[in-house]
Amino acid sequence: MSDSPEQTSAPFYLPTSNEVELFTAAYRQRLPVMLKGPTGCGKTRFVEHMAHRLGLPLFSVACHEDITAADLVGRYLLTGGETVWVDGPLTRAVRQGGMCYLDEIVEARADSTVVMHPLADHRRELNIERLGESLRAPDNFMLVVSYNPGYQSVLKDLKPSTRQRMVAIEMEYPAFEQELSIVVKESGVDEASAANLIKLANAVRKLDSGTLPEASSTRTLVATGRLMREGLSAREAAKAAMILPLTDDADIQRGLAEVIHSYLPG
Ligand code: ADP
């Protein structure tokens, strides 16, 4: 969990569309939000920024296939010969007020999405079966989930009944000028170098999903810029932070190395 209000200013986030207004409106109307977008496009940073702006503690959970309802709601643990109930992050957010962010929600097991239903609709209730307790969420509780629509099997898709309870905000890689500002600010490289990296990323993004499961994200551009700040050449940095993490296929790697050579100085 990160408690973002301890910071003095909100984490840097450059809006790319009307996402700040939509998110704020959803919070004021006590509606849960679903962020849809590719990995590394800024979803987590946006949530951290909004939690700070709205003055809410942030309870983040990176979901994966072993996450169960108990991981979110809580469980009895053995301590010193006793069983003690320990609230999970979702329960803590409901009890204290705050934003609960379930990152990559479709990775979690189905039973964990079921606990969200009464919480996500007008009841705003969290049922803690093991305690026989039902908590009503305070006005300053907000549920936010994110997922990558291009990166999941249809089977693991969120149930329509869950989706319909949420306000969806679609996020994409930022437009050229915006991505330029982000890469310069986040990595510290100069504008000309950042522009070359983004042109390279845009070339890679045109490849179809059969060639690469994911495209070069804003996150990988920032990482490339950071390596360049440490003295690596643009080509070395891009290979290490943008290309090799995307694929293990030697032929595709060779093809991408050629793309690097045509976009970046040696
Ligand atoms: P996601 O959660 O979508 O996988 P992140 O929020 O972790 O992606 O974003 C990855 C990185 O990209 C951030 O740490 C930040 O450096 C940068 N970034 C992406 N979009 C933005 C944005 N709009 N404003 C500021 N930084 C951004």
Image (cartoon, helix red, strand yellow):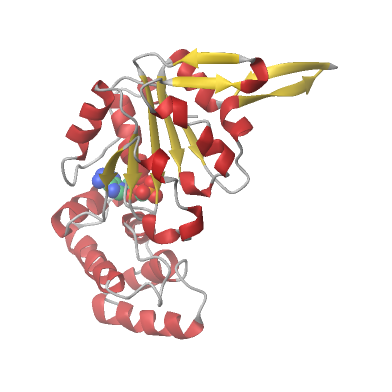
Residue extending furthest toward the front: 161
Q: Residue at 46% x, 59% y: name it.
A: 154
Quarter location, residue 108: top right
Q: Is residue 6 left or right of residue 89?
A: left
Q: Which percent across, then down, holds residue 47?
A: 34, 35
Left or right of 79 on screen, residue 157: left
**Residue 142 spot, x, y in % from top left:** 37, 25
The residue lying toward the viewer, choosing from 35 and 207, is 35
Is 224 situated above or below 16? below
Q: How many marks?
A: 0
Work out whether 259 lies above or below 32: below
Residue pushed farthest right? 81
Q: Is residue 137 above or below residue 1?
A: above
Rendered view: 16 above or below 237: above
Q: Quadrant of the C terminus?
A: bottom left
- The spot of residue 170 in percent (x, y) is 26, 48
Residue 2 appearing in the image:
no
User: Where, by quadrant of the figure, is residue 229 drawn?
Assistant: bottom left
- Image quadrant of residue 205? bottom left
User: Could you say where residue 28 lies in the image, as x and y percent from the top left?
Assistant: 24, 21
Identify which residue is drawn at 31% across, 51% down.
187
- The residue drawn where x is 51% and y is 38% is 113
Q: Is residue 23 visible?
A: yes
